[in-house]
Image (cartoon, rainbow, N blue to C red):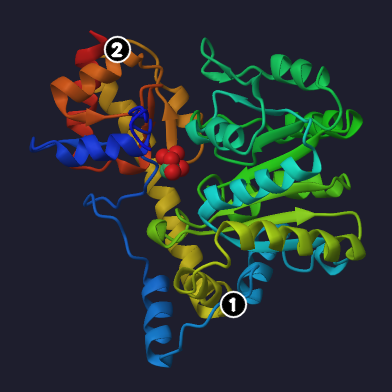
Amino acid sequence: LFESVELAPRDPILGLNEQYNADTRAGKVNLGVGVYYDDQGRLPLLQAVRKAEMARIEAAAARGYLPIEGIPGYNKAAQTLLFGQGSELLASGRVLTAQSLGGTGALKIGADFLKQLLPESKVVISDPSWENHRALFERAGFTVDTYPYYDAESHGLNFSGMLQSLQALPPQTIVLFHACCHNPTGVDPTFEQWQQIVEVVKAKNLVPFLDIAYQGFGDGLEEDASVVRLFAQHDLTMLISSSFSKSFSLYGERVGALTLVSSSKEESTRVLSQLKRVIRTNYSNPPTHGGTVVSTILNTPELYTLWTEELAGMRDRIRAMRTQLVQKLKDHGIQQDFDFVLKQRGMFSYSGLTAAQVDRLRDEYGVYAVSSGRICVAALNSGNLDHVAASIAKVLA
Ligand code: LMR
């Protein structure tokens, strides 16, 4: 049966973890996967999470099946994070949410559902995009193309290329956008540019799928949701995949949500009934623990406040690392201008390093980055910064 099965390549991001874990060198640094570490290089367990977990253990709750679409309070809170307290859209009943297995799970159930609705449509993703976007939509049966996004020369956005490309798409093309903190580049359109993008999406009858995996890591929870709210203001029907892996430091709990905005309350009921079939035939219903923890935090005012403070702490530390990295690169004699790192948002920096330089960083200096040149700034700390900057200086020399 399995004789003809070929060896698959390592995953471009998670495969790096395997290599990193097998590396026995002291002083190795993992800037590959998008994970936030504190200044001591530890994966944090947030205080808000700890408190919610303690409460859960105290309550000694039994572990029955959740509803197919997950915990109602979780889904409602996920919607509020996206659309804000007192949102008219939420009051209208046009929004429906299903708890998902991380952001990836949200994308996958969304993709499977879309394939039923729009079997002939193509999906377009930004060039570049998160490595798993293409693979995930292709697995769901779609042809995946790209739209121009990153401009290597300016280390910024190729906005005119992006807009022109979107304008030329056939109606009902599914367009994947990163709602904030673009992965891998860290380059986001300005709000004014987003306004133009939304106009095109609406005029051309495109289907927006907004991926928001880093809400709270850009400028703040509310600020980072502004693009989602802008799309909603234009009365668009759309899909949104949320991830709480990073914002709650709950990577292994697979906490995410798929939110759909439909045209009416009645339509939402029908849509949810179909989405539940997609979920049921994939994994039946979501797990309880992570969802309960997130739901408890989002629905308990003191824990919510604590969480937002902890999230702000992570955001501020990443910013500080950006500043210090740029300074350290200068200290190590790099002539090239790296100030673009300061403008990028979220966990990542598209460093401009080539695949060959990334290989040298890993092989000669034990510094792991994604072959595209993406580095996870959230994994830098005062202990490894100098080594990273010195190593980058050497491969650039
Ligand atoms: C990343 O881009 O590194 C993260 O989203 C983790 C992942 O699953 O790839």
- The location of residue 160, given as percent across then percent down, is 73, 15
- Judging depth in this view, the residue of 231 and 324 nearest the camera is 231
Residue 3 lies, with reference to residue 371, above or below; the image says: below
Does residue 307 appear anywhere in the picture? yes
Residue 274 lies, with reference to residue 389, above or below; the image says: below
Residue at image point 37% right, 47% down: 35
Extreme-front residue of the structure = 1
Q: Quadrant of residue 6?
A: top left
Q: Amino acid at mark 1?
A: Asn
Element on which disc 2 rests: helix
- The location of residue 136, given as percent across then percent down, is 56, 37
Q: Amino acid at mark 2?
A: Ala
According to the picture, the residue beneath numbered tag 1 turns out to be: 299
Q: Is residue 17 left or right of residue 152?
A: left
Q: Quadrant of residue 200?
A: top right
- The location of residue 11, given as percent across then percent down, is 37, 33
Q: Please rate how many residues cluster around mark 1, counting C-alpha atoms within 10 Å: few if below 14, some from 14 to 19, many from 20.
A: some
According to the picture, the residue beneath numbered tag 2 turns out to be: 356
Residue 394 lies, with reference to residue 369, above or below; the image says: above
Q: Quadrant of ligand 1?
A: top left
Residue at image point 63% right, 63% down: 280
Between the residue at mark 1 and the residue at mark 2, the CA separation in whole angstroms equals: 48 Å
Q: Is residue 86 left or right of residue 22?
A: right
